[in-house]
Image (cartoon, grey):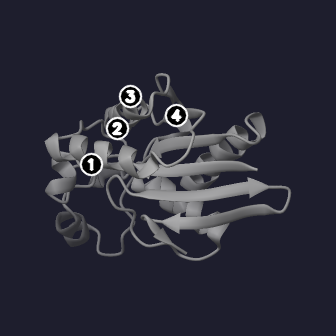
Amino acid sequence: MTYIALVRHGETDWNMHGRLQGSSDIPLNGTGRAQAREAAHRLAGREWHSIISSPLSRANETAQIIGAELGLDEPKTFPDLVERHYGEAEGLTDWEAYNEWPHGWYPGLEPRASVAERGLRTIVELAHDNPDDAIIVVSHGGVIRAILDVVHTRRSPRILNAAVSTLTVDANGWQVHTINNVSV
């Protein structure tokens, strides 16, 4: 059985102001760094074998902070873990985007199914290559939610900054244990 902790990156200034970040590379702020340390404390109760992350700096720095707290090697990055691309809406607040495109289909928006496919492909590959390991995967709210929606078969809530969602996979398939630090 492979145990996976999906962790959303800590807060950025764009998160704080309600801006759609998507694939824009926005760094963590001070609150985000503190949230990463809090996530490490939540994860400290078990042995971890590796930590990986999205290549975007907010996720990678979150992974570096968690890894340092837990004594893990530097995180490896996987390009398929980057956040959903929001097209022309990136950088806008939710309200500004809604005002411009009330139907929610922003020009250049990456389809949700594509996000789920690439995110799930990555964790399936990790589970296949690391059976019986415990792996921390630091990514983004949209990617984590898309993965959970596929393996949990229900619509997941919005994923909070630095929240930990856990799942396992074995011969019987996927099982989700927590979402946003809450048992399911």
State the image coordinates of residue 63 (x, y, percent, origin top left).
40, 35
At mark 3, the secondary structure is helix
**Disc number at residue 68?**
3
Q: Could you tell whether 121 is left or right of 67 in the image?
A: right
Residues at marks 1 and 2 touching, judged by CB atoms closer than 8 Å: yes
Q: Could you tell whether 60 is left or right of 11 in the image?
A: right
Q: Is residue 165 above or below residue 27?
A: below
Q: Nearer the viewer, mark 3 or mark 2?
A: 3
Q: Is residue 72 above or below residue 150?
A: above
**Disc number at residue 55?**
none
Q: Is residue 135 above or below residue 167?
A: above
| Amino acid beneath label 4 | Ile
* Residue carrying label 1: 35
Residue 112 appears in view: no
At mark 1, the secondary structure is helix
Between the C-alphas of marks 4 and 1, the distance is 18 Å
Q: Earlier in the sequence, mark 2 or mark 4?
A: 4
Mark 2 surroundings within 10 Å by alpha-carbon count, few (fewer than 14), some (14 through 19), many (20 or more): many
Question: In which quarter of the view is residue 166 placed?
Answer: bottom right
Between the C-alphas of marks 4 and 3, the distance is 13 Å
